[in-house]
Each structure stands twice: as C-alpha cells, then as structure tokens.
C-alpha cells in the first residue's frame, strides 16, 4: 500500500476504487515474490546448516521414540558435531563422485597430504601406487574410547591415523600411544593373522581404512 500512495489521494468513485484495488494486489504480489526469492536465496546459501539441523531434529525424535538415555544422547550429538566441523558429511563424498578419476585422485592426494608425508609406507612409494592406494582409502570417524581393532580377531584391514590419538592395549595394559600418520593393523592385514593388541581411541579420531582386497588391487 505504501508503494502506490494510498491515503494521499483517495479514490472518489467506483472505477477509481477498482483501479486502486488492482494496483494494491499487483504491488503486494510483486513484494511477496521478491521476498520469497530472497528467502530462498538465503536458504540455499546455508543448505549444509539446514541439513545439519534437520539431522539433529531427526536424532532428537529418535531419542524420544527409543527412550535413549541422556549420556548416550550427548555422545551421539558430540559425534555429529565433530563430523560437521571436520567436513566429513556426505557433501565430500558427493562432490568427489562428480569428478573424473584423475581429478578426484589429485584432490584426495592434496587432502591427505599430511598423512602421506607422515607415513613412511606411503611417503617412500612411487606416485602411481600412492594414487591407487588413496583411491581405496575409506574415511572413518570414531568418538573417544571406541575400539578400532580387538585383540584376537582376524585382521582384514589396516588404518592410517589422519587426525586424533589412539592407545594400544595388550594383555590389559596400555603399551603405546599413536598419533597422526601412524599405521594400525598392517601386520595382521598383510599376514591374515589375529590381532596382537587392542586399539582404542583416546580423542575423536579420523582414520583412513585400507582393506586387504583394496591393497591387493593397488599392488597388482
């Protein structure tokens, strides 16, 4: 109404009132259209934030439905927040899936450069082998005090620590701490033997998993 000056000039007959009403409707429609476009633009800019809040809402509904205890609820929320801050949600996998094989490998090599430079097994290998290995790596995230490998189980994959810290436990005693760049379970995976120790996370930890099958395919 303010855009057409209604109130300053008052319609004096039926025809003028009809024209004024039509002008008001058109002005209001244009205003609402612009408002919805701006709202949609803002929502699209912050799509990741919206998706994250949807996920948290779904989690809260699930907690109530299953009567999940509060300590476990906190643990789940902390895990989601860590994955969000580490950019490990599906956006990364979706993005890489749209790339060609060569470009995807280049992006992965760059994003994993700290691990590659810290691990002698990968640092000293030739570039073609590293690209094949990197393409087989799977990112996994663990919360504090989660068991990654269990002593006595048959090893079928190994891990590289990309971020965080783990403790190695053998015979009920802690024997070592391992940090970024360290390898876990390579002997059991290569020899297909039982794990000689349990590995448990100390902090939120991001690991790069390599299966025996993936390693064999890369080594051919």
Image (cartoon, rainbow, N blue to C red):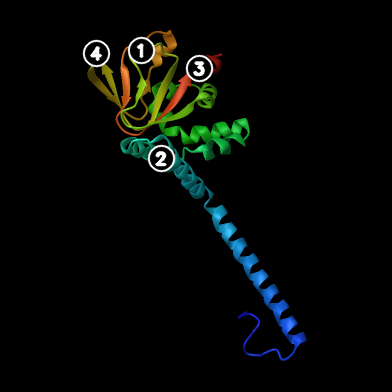
How far apart are labels 1 and 3 at the CA level?
18 Å
Q: Residue furthest left?
A: 173
Q: Secondary structure at mark 1?
A: loop
Horizontal side, residue 12 vs residue 164: left or right = right
User: Which quadrant of the figure has residue 28?
Assistant: bottom right
Q: Residue at x 35, y 30 (%)?
A: 180
Q: Position of residue 30 (x, y in %)?
A: 67, 70
How far apart are labels 1 and 4 at the CA level?
12 Å
User: Which quadrant of the figure has residue 164?
Assistant: top left
Horizontal side, residue 82 vs residue 30: left or right = left
How far apart are labels 4 and 2 at the CA level?
40 Å
Q: Residue at x 46, y 30 (%)?
A: 139
Sequence-wise, which precedes: disc 2 or disc 1?
Answer: 2
| Tag 2 residue | 64
Observer-nearest of 84 and 6? 6
Circles 1 and 3: CB distance less than 8 Å? Answer: no
| Tag 4 residue | 171
Horizontal side, residue 23 vs residue 79: left or right = right
Horizontal side, residue 108 vs residue 191: left or right = right
Q: Residues within 10 Å of mark 1 (few under 14, many from 20)?
A: many
Q: Residues within 10 Å of mark 4 (few under 14, many from 20)?
A: few
Circles 4 and 2: CB distance less than 8 Å? Answer: no
Q: Position of residue 166 (x, y in %)?
A: 31, 27
Sequence-wise, which precedes: disc 1 or disc 4?
Answer: 4
Circles 3 and 4: CB distance less than 8 Å? Answer: no
| Tag 3 residue | 215
Sequence-wise, which precedes: disc 3 or disc 4?
Answer: 4
Q: Is residue 175 above or below residue 180?
A: above
């Amino acid at each position: 109404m303010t855009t057409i000056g209604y109130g300053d000039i008052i319609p004096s007959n039926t025809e003028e009132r009809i024209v004024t009403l039509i002008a008001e409707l058109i002005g209001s429609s244009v205003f609402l259209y612009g408002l919805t476009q701006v709202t949609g633009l803002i929502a699209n800019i912050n799509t990741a934030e919206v998706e994250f809040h949807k996920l948290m809402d779904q989690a809260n509904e699930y907690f109530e439905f299953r009567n999940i205890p509060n300590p476990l609820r906190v643990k789940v929320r902390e895990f989601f927040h860590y994955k969000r801050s580490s950019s490990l949600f599906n956006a990364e996998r979706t993005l890489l899936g749209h790339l060609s094989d060569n470009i995807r490998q280049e992006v992965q090599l760059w994003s994993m450069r700290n691990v590659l430079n810290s691990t002698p097994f990968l640092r000293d290998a030739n570039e073609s082998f590293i690209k094949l290995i990197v393409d087989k790596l799977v990112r996994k995230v663990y919360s504090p005090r989660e068991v990654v490998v269990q002593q006595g189980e048959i090893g079928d994959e190994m891990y590289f620590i990309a971020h965080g810290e783990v403790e190695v436990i053998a015979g009920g005693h802690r024997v070592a701490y391992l940090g970024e760049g360290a390898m876990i379970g390579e002997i059991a995976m290569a020899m297909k033997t039982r794990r000689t120790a349990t590995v448990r996370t100390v902090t939120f930890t991001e690991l790069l998993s390599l299966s025996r099958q993936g390693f064999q395919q890369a080594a051919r």
